């Protein structure tokens, strides 16, 4: 195991429990443990959460694959964690992202149609976001596709890209339509930075679908965004054989 996988050695066994009545500031204060010491089927997920608590801004360390962890399990557990944390963004969005303010799910010139209905249709952005998170959670917890937390069947790997693509739309809507809420959330959690690095590392999202400007690009992002609007990538059209059956259309009539 590399040195990056060893944060601090816990010399005694500890019960990792949150008891009723525990104050927030006293939560998750158990000793930091080595990855090898987290020997339950949930060990990889616990390790990811531990590294996030230690320094959520160090997204490179959080996403880096430990030597002893299966590459597919690592992606699986990270996607589960992203879904958990995105629910907090939904809470932040709810007062502003209402049916009146956002009657449709849009992001950077695209309108997304929701497949969580008897027939694919447009629905309010907040409903679309909730449907997306519910659908991703249901898929990741479906024992037919993911029967184990320690190995991932080869046929199930295709779902990672489908899930990541849908989750990206949540970030994109928040960025383009609720910028202050998005920025406040991102400054606190670094969730988008982590999700983007994960997606780039494991090729979960094509570069052509990344529409949120890189804040580190020193003002060069606007040209890329204009080009995106003029020439919407064909990859935005969903594959009918994919589990992601949501449809996208250009809101600009392109």
Image (cartoon, rainbow, N blue to C red):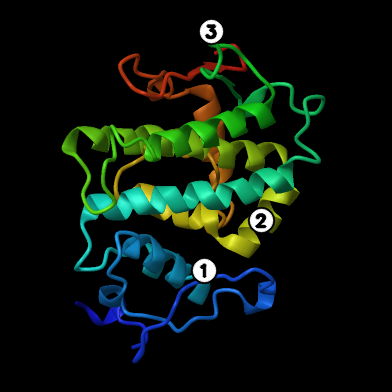
Tag 2: Cα neighbours inside 10 Å, few (<14), some, or many (≥20)? some
Disc 3 versus disc 2: distance between alpha carbons?
33 Å
Out of 85 and 10, give the one closest to the viewer: 10
Out of 233 and 192, give the one closest to the viewer: 192
Residue at image mark 1 = 56
For the N terminus, the image quarter is bottom left
Residue 35, image x, y percentages: 30, 74
Residue 126, image x, y percentages: 68, 31
Numbered label attached to residue 185: 2
Residue 247, image x, y percentages: 49, 17
Residue at image mark 3 = 119
Of the two numbered discs 3 and 2 on the same chain, state the one appearing first in sequence.
3
Residue 190, quarter of the rendered image: bottom right
Of the two numbered discs 3 and 1 on the same chain, state the one appearing first in sequence.
1
Disc 2 secondary structure class: helix
Q: Can residue 212 be seen in this view?
A: yes
Q: Which of marks 3 and 2 is in front?
A: 3
Residue projecting furthest to the top:
119
Callout count: 3
Out of 17 and 112, give the one closest to the viewer: 17
Numbered label attached to residue 205: none
Tag 1: Cα neighbours inside 10 Å, few (<14), some, or many (≥20)? some
Q: Which residue is drawn at 25% across and 75% down?
A: 36
């Amino acid at each position: 195991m590399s040195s990056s996988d060893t944060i601090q050695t816990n010399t005694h066994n500890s019960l990792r429990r949150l008891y009723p009545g525990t104050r927030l500031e006293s939560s998750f204060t158990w000793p930091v443990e080595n990855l090898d010491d987290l020997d339950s089927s949930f060990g990889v997920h616990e390790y990811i959460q531990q590294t996030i608590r230690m320094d959520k801004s160090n997204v490179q360390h959080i996403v880096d694959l430990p030597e002893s962890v299966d590459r597919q399990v690592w992606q699986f557990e990270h996607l589960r964690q992203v879904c958990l944390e995105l629910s907090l963004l939904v809470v932040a969005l709810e007062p502003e992202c209402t049916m009146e303010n956002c009657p449709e799910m849009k992001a950077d010139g695209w309108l997304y149609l929701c497949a969580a209905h008897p027939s694919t249709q447009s629905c309010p952005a907040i409903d679309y976001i909730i449907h997306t998170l519910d659908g991703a959670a249901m898929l990741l917890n479906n024992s037919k596709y993911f029967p184990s937390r320690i190995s991932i069947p080869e046929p199930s790997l295709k779902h990672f890209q489908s899930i990541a693509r849908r989750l990206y739309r949540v970030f994109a809507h928040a960025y383009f339509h609720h910028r202050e809420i998005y920025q406040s959330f991102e400054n606190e959690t670094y969730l988008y930075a982590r999700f983007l690095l994960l997606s780039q590392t494991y090729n979960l999202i094509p570069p052509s679908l990344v529409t949120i400007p890189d804040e580190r690009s020193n003002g060069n992002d606007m040209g890329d965004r204009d080009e995106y609007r003029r020439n919407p990538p064909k990859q935005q059209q969903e594959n009918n054989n994919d589990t992601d059956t949501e449809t996208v259309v250009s809101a600009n009539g392109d």
